[in-house]
Image (cartoon, grey):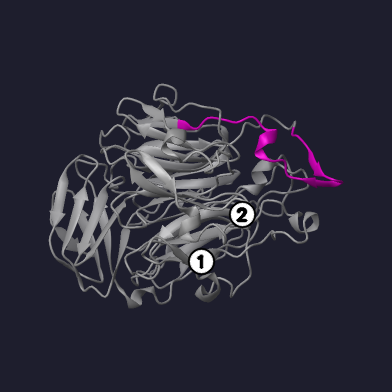
Amino acid sequence: MEFRHFNGAAGSYHYPETHGSGAAFADFNGDGFPDLYVVNSAATHGVLTAHLPANALFVNQTDGTFVDRAVEAGVADTSFGMGVGVGDVDNDGHADLYVTNWGANRLYRNLGNGRFADVTEQSGTGDLRVSTSTAFADIDLDSDLDLYVANDVRIVGDDLPECYRGLIQIYCGPGAYPGDSGSLFRNDGDLRFTDITDSMGVWTEAGRQLGVGFADYDDDGDFDLYVANDHEPNFLFRNDGSQFAEVGVAAGVATSPDGAPEAGMGTDWSDYDRDGRLDLGVCNFQWEPCRLLHNAGAGRFADHTAQSGLGGPTYQTLTFGTDFVDVNNDGYPDLFLANGHVEPNIEILDSAGPRYAQHDQLFLNNRDGTFTDVTATSGLTAFSAGVGRGSAAADYDNDGDVDLFVSNNNQRPHLLRNDGGNRANWISVELEGTRSNRSGIGARVTVLSADLRQMAEVRGGSSYLSHNDLRLHFGLGRRTKVDRILIRWPSGESQTVGSVPARRFVRIVEGEPWTPL
């Protein structure tokens, strides 16, 4: 896998140089193996480079290797890239791409023949701003995928602020720039979208938006939106059907427990304690821990950061990528964090403090509401630390355990193969909607196996600037079969699938029996 992220830095300290980039796992060619799209950035403001950095589409060769086919596929974008999302926006059975940039974003329609068509202009989703993370969901339950695009700050022209610590120039923080609103696009069909940000109640310039994720946190059948803001209170937009209401403060997910805004970066939803409710993780800047926000029901969350054991080990790191994944297949989501600083001079400015390059972290779920830091024994410290940004998860080699990819700023990425998680049993579930959106995004899947009950939703974007494989992976431990799979589709239809043997990839079409893959 030949790829190196280029952040465009050339001594001018442009704020977006610190952001990128993201990545997405998805089966773009329909062969049953996840491919990988990786976003690159670009030279800033006329800086000359020896080569033109471009995004990469790594097609899975099914033998553990990948080949970059971005040029042939028509998706080798050379814009200043940030993040990426995946969803079948036209319900034709092929995974489409939405790429966020500092500048015009791109919507690529998957033609199903190894090529994509740029339909940005037709779709009306170009959004010429500093866009970061993006997420798909069917917010109006009309069977097609709508789109949310997070925007960070407003940067106009070349009149940039300069910031110093002593005599050393540093990157200005987000407070040096005005905030910007995210954008909510309604899918009107025929590859056309309408900007409904204002009319749906999500327009606000109060934030500086980095991480986003849809989930039905209140279990009412529609999809709510969480936005992690940098140095501003985070947003929780509750979907009330005809509009969204911002309830972050009331729900207890906007600030630290003492009411202070933090520097939210990456975020992910997961029922980490298997109580049937979707909990929330959001990670922050150094000297602010990753927050574990336990869904207490009735629209409220409780901060379980300290009692979970995550507070101390995440306090000195600067975390972007945030992924709940069951790496050991015991049936409980573990937590992977991609770490890296934003200031290349940090080791000069603070010789006793955090490093620029930082090791990623892995916390195993102890199945009692606590986590154990296993970074040192997991293999994550066996190679050089990176300047981690986006992270994405998928079982890319289809061997029964979840692997990870980390995009590192201005460095080569890390592809982290899971060796050993498949010693325990598992099942992988792929969904296809008929009355619902074809991707199955937003479907809630509950897997029952003996004494273990697991629930997850198909997410259309998570972590930071990134997108995980749409297949849902459930660890089973020593259990040899799944007794039942319960699905609540976005259409409202409920479906029950009977006994399924362990160690299977299964495909479930809405309203039809399961089939092995």
Q: Amino acid at mark 2?
A: Leu
Secondary structure under tag 2 reads loop
Q: Which mark is residue 176?
A: none
Magenta residues, start to end: 160-183
Q: Residues within 10 Å of mark 1 (few under 14, many from 20)?
A: some
Residue at numbered disc 2: 318
**Sooner in the amino-acid sequence: mark 1 or mark 2:** 2
Where residue 90 appears, x then y in whole percent?
A: 31, 39
Kindly identify the residue that appears in the image at 43 percent across and 62 percent down: 370
Observer-nearest of 509 and 163: 163
**In the image: residue 483, left or right of residue 230:** left
**Label 2, residues with CA under 10 Å away: few <14, some 14-19, many ≥20:** many
Residue 194 % position (x, y) = 39, 26
Determine whether label 1 and label 2 are within 8 Å by CB: no
447 vs 101, nearest the viewer: 447
Residue located 46% across and 59% down the image = 308
Q: Which mark is residue 415?
A: 1
- Identified at 56% across, 63% down, the residue is 360
| Left/right of residue 293 with respect to residue 178 in the rendered view | left
Q: Is residue 442 magenta?
A: no
Give the vertical position of 327 relative to 465 (above or below). Answer: below
Image location (x, y in percent) of residue 117: 42, 43
- Viewer-nearest of discs 1 and 2: 2
